[in-house]
Image (cartoon, rainbow, N blue to C red):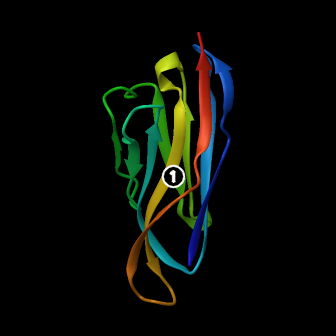
């Protein structure tokens, strides 16, 4: 089994910055893509950014130029630096990862429990 634990959410004012982190632990042999999703009340969950094990990144148009995704492969951790935050960035942010498990030798997809980000105007 694998666990993803997010941290770093909170309440900030518009224009401020906030950093999130997500640490994976458990039966991990390797991790391919790590992703950040978000879900606002009444909305579907949407992909915010992702990063491959080689460092290739991808961003939603709504966050390009403001958010930066990075990862530390040695620590099985992915980060999301969010700058110039807007009220519309308010959501629960979820970490997601494709993990090759050490015990099963299968690829599985895992989700974190989510962390709340609230941006006040």
Residue under the image location 53 percent in, 63 percent down? 73
**Please, is residue 13 above or below residue 74 in the view?**
above
Residue under the image location 30 percent in, 29 percent down? 61
- Asked whether 92 or 80 is in front, the reply is 92
- Residue 60 x/y as whole percent: 33, 34
Answer whether residue 35 is visible to the viewer in this image.
Answer: yes
- Asked whether 84 or 110 is in front, the reply is 110
Residue under the image location 39 percent in, 42 percent down? 45
**Please, is residue 102 above or below residue 98 in the view?**
below
* Label 1 environment density (alpha carbons within 10 Å; few <14, some 14–19, many ≥20): many
Which residue extends farthest front? 42
- Residue 38 x/y as whole percent: 46, 39
Q: What residue is shown with label 1?
A: 95
**Please, is residue 44 above or below residue 104 in the view?**
above
- Residue 96 x/y as whole percent: 46, 57
Answer whether residue 86 is visible to the viewer in this image.
Answer: no
Mark 1 falls on what kind of element?
A: strand
- Residue 55 x/y as whole percent: 40, 54
């Amino acid at each position: 089994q694998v666990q993803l634990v997010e941290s770093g959410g909170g309440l900030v004012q518009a224009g401020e910055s906030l950093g999130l982190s997500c640490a994976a632990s458990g039966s991990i042999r390797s991790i391919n893509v790590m992703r950040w999703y978000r879900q606002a009340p009444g909305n579907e969950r949407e992909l915010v950014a992702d990063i491959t094990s080689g460092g290739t990144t991808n961003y939603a148009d709504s966050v390009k130029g403001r958010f930066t995704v990075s990862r530390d492969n040695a620590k099985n951790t992915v980060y999301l630096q969010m700058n110039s935050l807007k009220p519309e960035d308010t959501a629960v942010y979820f970490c997601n990862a494709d993990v090759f498990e050490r015990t099963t030798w299968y690829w599985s997809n895992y989700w974190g429990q989510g962390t709340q980000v609230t941006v006040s105007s």
